[in-house]
Amino acid sequence: MNTIRPLLIAFIALFWESPTFACAMVKQQVIEDINQADFIVSANVEKYELVQHPEYKNAEFALFTIKIDRRFKGNLAGIQHVRWHNSTFGLPQTRPNPQLILLAGNFSSDSDEGLPQIYPLQVFQISCSSAFIFPYDRQYEEQVWRAVNGLISWDTLEDALYC
């Protein structure tokens, strides 16, 4: 009986649809992981909204409408829509402050999280860690550019981004 109970609990946890079972342990964000992103931009948040897609089960996501301020990686320009399916921590109900952010993201496909391809850009987030969305100050532009291009280590910029 002592071995059946843990197996039963593990089996139930596999199929339980609850954020509490999404991650057994939250991982500390590692700033160097940002190198895996397809794009890194500083942008003004023009609009933030929660979206529930009627055709997709559990398809609530946040949608950022951003105006690109500067590209550090990737070829995005102008106004873009970036979705954020934050299954680890839940989605903020209102727009995160400040208005100017440093954002890393990926190009998604239809298969990502079962969400539609309507918005092909998504916020970069390592499973069980925080999203790569940071309050941004233009005084760090040169350091961000140098870190993205491998001229300095991300560690030299990390403290500034988290403050």
Image (cartoon, rainbow, N blue to C red):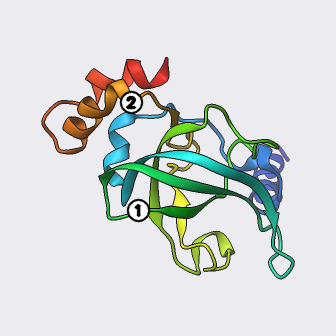
One can see residue 77 in this view: yes
Identify the residue under disc 1. 77
Local secondary structure at mark 2: helix
Q: Residues within 10 Å of mark 1 (few under 14, many from 20)?
A: some
Decide which of 118, 137 is in the foreground and name it: 137
Left or right of 85? Residue 133 is: left
* Number of disc labels: 2
Decide which of 92, 114 is in the foreground and name it: 92
Name the residue: 33% across, 27% down: 140
Name the residue: 60% across, 37% down: 99
Question: Where in the figure is residue 7, as x and y percent of width and height?
Answer: 76, 53
Identify the residue under disc 2. 138
Q: Quadrant of residue 123?
A: bottom right
Decide which of 119, 98 is in the foreground and name it: 98
Left or right of 65? Residue 92 is: right
Q: Residues within 10 Å of mark 2 (few under 14, many from 20)?
A: few
Decide which of 61, 78 is in the foreground and name it: 78
Q: Mark 1 belongs to which amino acid?
A: Ala
Local secondary structure at mark 1: loop
Question: Where in the figure is residue 12, as x and y percent of width and height?
Answer: 83, 57
Question: Where in the figure is residue 41, as x and y percent of width and height?
Answer: 40, 49
Left or right of 61? Residue 161 is: left
Could you give the CA–CA distance between mark 1 and mark 2, rounded to whole angstroms?
17 Å
One can see residue 3 in this view: no
Left or right of 151? Residue 86 is: right
Q: Mark 2 belongs to which amino acid?
A: Arg
